[in-house]
């Protein structure tokens, strides 16, 4: 549940989600669930010319399983808190 | 269990990753991708958050005229990155280089 | 289940908000399906009404009617809400018929196959040498 909790803290921040099919979308994190499915608002496709079908899409749901990376805001969460939460998770899981 | 005792025991593979927290690690991913960065968080799926990441992508391109294979490595840096665990092939603990 | 709040359903980060809206579903094989979301579950299995497949090749496209579609969640890449105020495709894109789009698709596929077969032959030639 570590990353589920972590992403919940980032709701409202801008992230860039890079998918396994190379599509990259920047948007404001709207919601996340325990599978790490995410919803983005006010989205913009990074390489728009290659993906004309995404032109009118401004809000989208991304299935967690197709995510490769999520580029995060640097000021999102204190890294010390992240380290502690990871150690707690390692102990519990 | 006392925290000091538990911190140094290695009973299972993921304990080695725990010892790499806040250290720079090397991660090999599917799709000829490699990452080097500081490990800030991970879970049992090997989902991770890395800081000051350098990503290298190895591409094989074909010359349009000679059909020769050209191997190219694209590099980029990302300040703060979540990596989904299902793409991870291997994790190597603290780098001696970099 | 579908009318309850987003928090009541485990998983599927609030697709409830998108019910009865016109959506674009991108599948893992690259296909693009447009339709009205009528139902979903925690796996992101979705039911689309009045679905069409939108095939785009270069700057031509074609919408092929599919009817009522149930899409298995594991094949879903993303589900995008279509902003009805915006153009769905760039203005210079030209709508063509089914036969024409199939031909364009085939030409595109043949071109990429030619490249990979030439590459394979070249590699065999170099190995032999």
Image (cartoon, coloured by chain):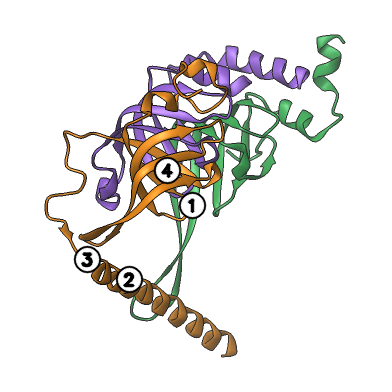
Q: CA distance from mark 4 to mark 2?
A: 31 Å
On screen, residue C127 versus residue C118, left or right, reads: right
Mark 2 surroundings: few (<14), some (14-19) or many (≥20) residues within 10 A: few
Mark 3 surroundings: few (<14), some (14-19) or many (≥20) residues within 10 A: few
Please say if the residues under marks 3 and 4 sit with CB atoms less than 8 Å apart.
no
Q: Residue at x 58, y 51 (%)?
A: B30
To which residue does mark 1 refer?
B57
Choose mark 3 or mark 1, whichever is in front: 3
Mark 1: secondary structure? strand
User: What colour denotes chain C?
Assistant: orange
Give the percent coordinates (x, y) of residue A65.
Answer: 55, 39
Residue most toward the top? B2
Q: Residue A85 occupies which quadrant of the picture?
A: top right
Please tell me whether residue A19 is drawn above or below residue A36 in the rendered image.
below
Q: Which label sits on residue C97?
A: 3
Q: CA distance from mark 3 to mark 2?
A: 17 Å
On screen, residue B94 versus residue C105, left or right, reads: right
């Amino acid at each position: 549940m570590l990353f589920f909790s972590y992403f919940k803290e980032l709701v409202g921040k801008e992230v860039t989600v890079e998918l396994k099919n190379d599509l990259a979308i920047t948007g404001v994190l709207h919601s996340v669930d325990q599978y790490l499915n995410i919803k983005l608002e006010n989205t913009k496709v990074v390489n728009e010319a290659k993906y004309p079908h995404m032109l009118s899409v401004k809000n989208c749901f991304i299935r967690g399983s197709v995510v490769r990376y999520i580029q995060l805001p640097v000021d999102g969460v204190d890294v010390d808190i992240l380290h502690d939460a990871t150690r707690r998770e390692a102990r519990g899981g | 269990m006392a925290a000091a005792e538990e911190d140094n025991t290695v009973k299972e593979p993921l304990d080695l990753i725990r010892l790499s927290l806040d250290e720079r690690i090397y991660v090999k991913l599917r799709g000829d991708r490699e990452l080097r960065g500081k490990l800030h968080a991970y879970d049992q799926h090997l989902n991770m958050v890395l800081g000051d990441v350098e990503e290298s992508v190895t591409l094989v391109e074909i010359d349009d005229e000679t059909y020769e294979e050209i191997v190219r490595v694209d590099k980029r840096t990302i300040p703060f990155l979540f990596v989904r665990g299902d793409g991870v092939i291997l994790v190597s603990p603290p780098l001696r280089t970099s | 289940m579908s009318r309850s709040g987003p928090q009541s359903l485990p998983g599927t980060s609030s697709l409830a908000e998108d019910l009865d809206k016109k959506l674009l579903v991108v599948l893992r094989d690259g296909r693009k399906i447009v339709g009205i979301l009528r139902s979903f579950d925690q796996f992101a299995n979705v039911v689309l009404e009045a679905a069409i497949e939108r095939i785009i090749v270069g700057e031509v496209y074609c919408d092929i009617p599919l009817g009522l579609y149930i899409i298995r969640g594991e094949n879903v890449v993303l589900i995008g809400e279509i902003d009805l105020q915006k153009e769905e495709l760039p203005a210079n894109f030209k709508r063509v018929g089914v036969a024409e789009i199939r031909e364009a698709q085939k030409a595109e596929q043949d071109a990429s196959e030619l490249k990979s077969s030439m590459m394979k032959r070249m590699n065999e030639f170099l190995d032999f040498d």
